[in-house]
Amino acid sequence: MDPRPAVTTTTLAELEALLENLGLERWRARPILQWVHRRRAGSFDEMTDLSKAQRADLAGRFRIFTSVVRERRESPDGTEKLLIAVEDGNLIETVLIREGDRKTICVSTQVGCPVKCVFCASGLNGLVRNLTAGEIVEQVLHVNRLLAPEDRIDSLVLM
């Protein structure tokens, strides 16, 4: 596991404190979070209002995500499924449903499922664990990175 703290799992106050403890300016926390949550940055290299040296320094001390998109599949109807590996190696699925100009995300809240429906692979091994708030947020951020800059998510469904 990567020991660097992830930006997506911190609040503004937590990121300010982390930056300050590392001898960096705490005011940088707000623009960093805005880059990730509003401007859809997936790396410090994309944060172009920071110098190259600052981006390299931050990348050495922090990471953006704890999860990784392992696979992306698109259905003929335009639905996109992301298979996401969370930090402990478990896999979850996030689905983007496009209906006209509306976009809905089905977001996983657990690894596995306790229901064990015969038609669904999610419950084959039962419930493994609940996802953390950061792991849930990261699913939305991964999907946002698939969208055009002017596109927005209209609704979320937690599953």
Image (cartoon, rainbow, N blue to C red):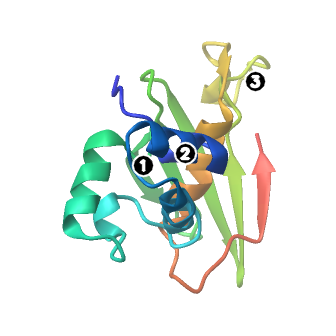
Question: Above or below — where is 4 with respect to 128?
Answer: below
SS class of the residue under badge 1?
Answer: loop
SS class of the residue under badge 3?
Answer: loop
Question: Above or below — where is 71 with respect to 97?
Answer: above
Quick check: can you spot residue 6?
Answer: no
Q: Amino acid at mark 1?
A: Ile
Q: Dot 3 surroundings within 10 Å: few (below 14), some, or many (20 or more)?
A: few
Q: Amino acid at mark 3?
A: Cys
Residue at mark 3: 117
Q: Earlier in the sequence, mark 1 or mark 3?
A: 1
Image coordinates of residue 74 in percent, x first then y, are: 48, 62
Residue at mark 2: 15
Q: Name the residue located 77 percent from the left edge and 57 percent from the top edge.
A: 156
Q: Amino acid at mark 2?
A: Leu
Front residue of 37/150: it is: 37
Q: Dot 1 surroundings within 10 Å: few (below 14), some, or many (20 or more)?
A: many
Quick check: can you spot residue 151?
Answer: yes
Q: Name the residue located 36 percent from the left edge and 33 percent from the top edge.
A: 4
Question: How many numbered discs sit on the rendered protein?
Answer: 3
Image coordinates of residue 83 in percent, x first then y, are: 47, 43
Q: Name the residue located 61 percent from the left edge and 39 percent from the top edge.
A: 134
Left or right, 131 with reference to 68: right
Residue at mark 1: 64
Q: Which mark is residue 44?
A: none
Callout in the foreground (1, 3): 1
Q: Name the residue located 45 percent from the left edge and 36 percent from the top edge.
A: 21
